[in-house]
Image (cartoon, helix red, strand yellow):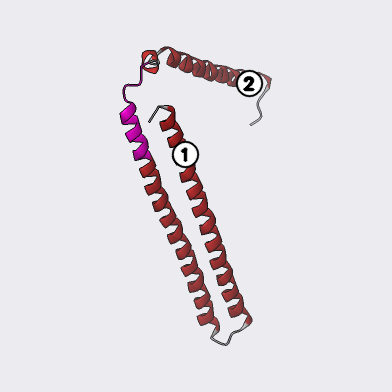
Amino acid sequence: MKLNFVTKRLSTVGRWMATALFCVSAIAFFWVGAFFSNSPAMAAPLTNAIASADVGSQAQGKASEDAGRTKNFVRDAAEQVKKTANKNASRVEQATGSDGNFIERKAKRDADRIEKRANEDSARTQEAIDNTKNALESAIDGIKDAFGK
């Protein structure tokens, strides 16, 4: 259905009004949030410095634990990929017979390539996990040092 001149203009005006209403609502939302923030809490003295040091140590422990779990997950995923590649290669071997034809050799090469890439990807991912964990721990150490341990 083709819109005529009046409905096109009404549609355009409606879109502009909806956009303006959305922007005004967003501005009002942030404006009200600025007035209802808890300003005295921001200026409160450090009474929980000992507890914050303990929280920092807990956060570092949790980061190490989670990094270990994540690395185990990555290792398991790599092993599953290798297992699947070998299973597919053996299926091709069974389907074509054990005479070492071109398709069978290609399947074995593909399985070897998939295993190699799985190992490389796993190593890269584990290195990235270690880097992230180290960055998090150094950030926590920096925060603990800033608050005087």
Which one is nearer the viewer's eye here, 109 or 66? 66
In terms of secondary structure, what is the magenta stretch mainly? helix
Circles 1 and 2: CB distance less than 8 Å? Answer: no
Extreme residue in the top direction: 35
Q: Dot 1 corresponds to which residue?
A: 138
Sequence order check: which comes first, mark 1 or mark 2?
2
Residue type beneath disc 2:
Thr
Which numbered mark, 1 or 2, is in the foreground of this view? 1
Whole-percent x and y of residue 26?
A: 50, 19
Which one is nearer the viewer's eye here, 129 or 89? 129
Secondary structure, mark 2, is helix
Compute the Cα span from label 1 to label 2.
Answer: 53 Å
Quarter of the image for the N terminus: give it: top right
* Mark 1 burial class by Cα count in 10 Å: few <14, some 14-19, many 20+: few
From what the image shows, is residue 111 above or below residue 32? below
Which one is nearer the viewer's eye here, 20 or 30? 30
Residue type beneath disc 1:
Ser
* Mark 2 burial class by Cα count in 10 Å: few <14, some 14-19, many 20+: few
Q: Which residues are magenta?
A: 44-59
Identity of the residue drawn at 39% across and 14% down: 39
Secondary structure, mark 1, is helix
Which one is nearer the viewer's eye here, 51 or 103? 51
Q: Is residue 114 magenta?
A: no
Identity of the residue drawn at 35% across and 38% down: 57
Identity of the residue drawn at 61% across and 84% down: 101
Whole-percent x and y of residue 89?
A: 53, 75
Question: Is 13 situated left or right of 57 in this image?
Answer: right
Q: Dot 2 corresponds to which residue?
A: 12
Q: Which mark is residue 67?
A: none
Question: Is 44 situated left or right of 124 in this image?
Answer: left
